Image (tube, rainbow, N blue to C red):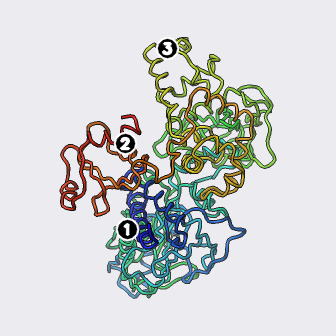
Amino acid sequence: MTEEEAKKRIEELRKLIEYHNYRYYVLDSPEISDAEYDALMRELMELEEKFPQFITPDSPTQRVGAPPLEVFPTYRHRVPMLSLQNAFSEEDLIAFDRRIKRFLGMDEKEIIEYCAELKMDGLAVSLVYENGILTHGATRGDGFEGEEVTPNLKTIRSIPLRINIPNPPAFIEVRGEVIMHKKDFEELNRQRAEMGEPLFANPRNAAAGSVRQLDSSITAQRKLDIFCYGIGYCEGYEFQTQYQVLETLRSWGFKVNPHFRLCKGIEEAIEYCREWTEKHHELPYETDGTVIKVNSIALQNELGTLARSPRWAIAFKFPAEQGITQIEDIIVQVGRTGTLTPVAVLKPVEVGGVTISRATLHNEDEIKRLGVKIKDWVVVQRAGEVIPEIVAVVTSRRTGEEIDFKMPDKCPVCGSQVVRLPDEVAYRCINYSCPAQVKERIYHFASRDAMNIEGLGKEWVDKLVDSGLIKDAADLYYLKLWDLLKLERMGERLARKLLDNIEKSKNNELYRLIYALGIRHVGESTARLLAQHFGSLERLMNASLEEIAQIPGIGPVVGESIYRFFREPHNRELIEKLKKAGVKMTEEEKVGPEEKPLAGQRIVFTGALRSMERSKAEEIVAKLGGIPSSSVSRNTTLVVVGENPGSKYQRAIELGIKTINEEEFLEMIRPYVEV
Ligand code: I6G
């Protein structure tokens, strides 16, 4: 490939990747499979490696891999990021409408148009685009100066690295709220509890803590999202209304919350607040209210600002959903790494339509902070929908019967000593063979995102460990039919099926095995990076700390954790045992990209395939070095035609591109994959 050709292809790939990022992360409506996306990204990375002179800051490869910072530089906002006045009732909203009319010299009966929006509970940020390129990203800070966190914000895929329109404004500050979805927050806290790390109190703190990381590789591992809602300083574009700001931002590729509404008069805005007070719990992210803004920007300018907040906007706060109940007991659960988590057993209570009977108390520090005792009456709050938490003790209801809780000094499961490591908030059972830890490690190993052993749920793992048939995950591969038949309620058919599924998992992709090992800080995406980089477990195990930590997307903390994991004798023994059982420990594609059978081929599928799902066929193409594509262009090299082909077939004929049928496709791939 010549320099010229490489440059052209790199530009083409960037556009394609950002377009698919936009489909996936902004519109939530992907057009291509993960395998196709990975293939595009891989091609771009390979080309940029060969032609580093073409790397630019807005390349999708630059979303990860910035070196860690010592401190955050200060960033001065051109237009300050103000705060909002608050309204706690409908009367407050009516008073707001009256104040505005009085200030503008309008009659009470006149109607003001408002734009009503949801107020996301996250971290406010400002994104600066110069001639369409994202050049700075900063937190709100004190409203005038924030912290520059550009490398961290670039890791958020729903933030465009460039405004993809012909004449972008010369300079624009786009304001938005970085959030963490409830389910991602819960998963993050679950992992942190497991690792004995302090938990985030709510998704807002998790989002803020993730954006304010000096090492952007940590931010990259957190699932963050953004909703943009406003403009600060802007040169080269005029807006007439807030509604138009939102529509324009959306058309420029920014993620805008879809639930905004134009309201004619304050009554309609109040109706909007009523509706969302009722149903905001159904949203997959947390909101703490709504924001009502005068829609006309000319009127906004006339109204101006009070000391620190605009006169033309107000935040209506949702009332918190809380309930009061009594703690019947505090029990202690033991996690995969031995972390002891206290959990309050509650008298069931209904909060916001959901019955709550347990609440996590996180750790001993949290119990001390709350001053909570067994039998105490407490205020419980639904945070993040699923994990309820205790926010306060109702001390006025104490009778003297309350019992102090003390973290046990022995593990409640195996009776071993528990310790609190100097830099951790959690107590841990340090017995690696503790049945609770053994079970948790095996649950994780077999889980869907890890080795995906279908049918091996928690209850079977419990029975297998309790009956002494297995002591670690590798033992699963040595189980015999007669072993399984010893278990209560296990029939022959089920046992055969389970053994079959265990056997199948031996041939999983390498990243699954790496993830299944349960290395601290190694989630599925880091496992994929490691599998791609090292190609075999052997190479990963023997890699130096420097080699691991310099992989783009893996910072020093994660690198250290991976390196340390493979220095533990019990981990090496487990891997040896898995290897002996025949678990595959290499990535199939050990060959270089140009040696793969479908290297250089750009393949499009049209019509239904009989032998497999289209996504599977695309996965195979990518595995064999080809690029599965969703549309036919002059660059397409081959079109596979299934039953009832669509317009892509017609287009292939018009462009004179080679077509083959399903049988011919199967013949082509059979030497390399089992079909
Ligand atoms: O903090 C905020 C959240 C949401 C805002 C805001 C908003 O609009 C949906 N709008 C303004 C004008 C300000 N803060 C200052």
Residues under labels 1 and 3: Cα distance?
A: 59 Å
The picture quadrant where one finds residue 267 is bottom left
Percent position of residue 587, x then y: 53, 42
Q: Mark 1 sits on what residue?
A: 269
Q: Nearer the viewer, residue 403 or 602?
A: 602
Labelled pair 1, 3 in contact (Cβ < 8 Å): no
**SS for callout 2:** helix
In the picture, the disc for residue 489 is 3
- The local crowd at label 3, few if under 14, some if 14 to 19, many if 20 or more residues have their Cα within 10 Å, is few
N-terminal of the two: label 2 or label 1? 1
Q: Which amino acid, mark 1?
A: Ala
Q: Mark 2 sits on what residue?
A: 616
- The local crowd at label 2, few if under 14, some if 14 to 19, many if 20 or more residues have their Cα within 10 Å, is few
Taking 399 as reference, is 483 above or below it? above
Q: Residue at x 32, y 44 (%)?
A: 614
Q: Which amino acid, mark 2?
A: Lys
Is disc 2's CB within 8 Å of ligand 1?
no
Percent position of residue 641, x then y: 23, 47
Query: Which numbered mark, 2 or 3, is in the foreground of this view?
Result: 2
Percent position of residue 236, x then y: 42, 87
Residue 395 is at least partly visible in this image: no
- The local crowd at label 1, few if under 14, some if 14 to 19, many if 20 or more residues have their Cα within 10 Å, is many
Q: Residue at x 44, y 21 (%)?
A: 497
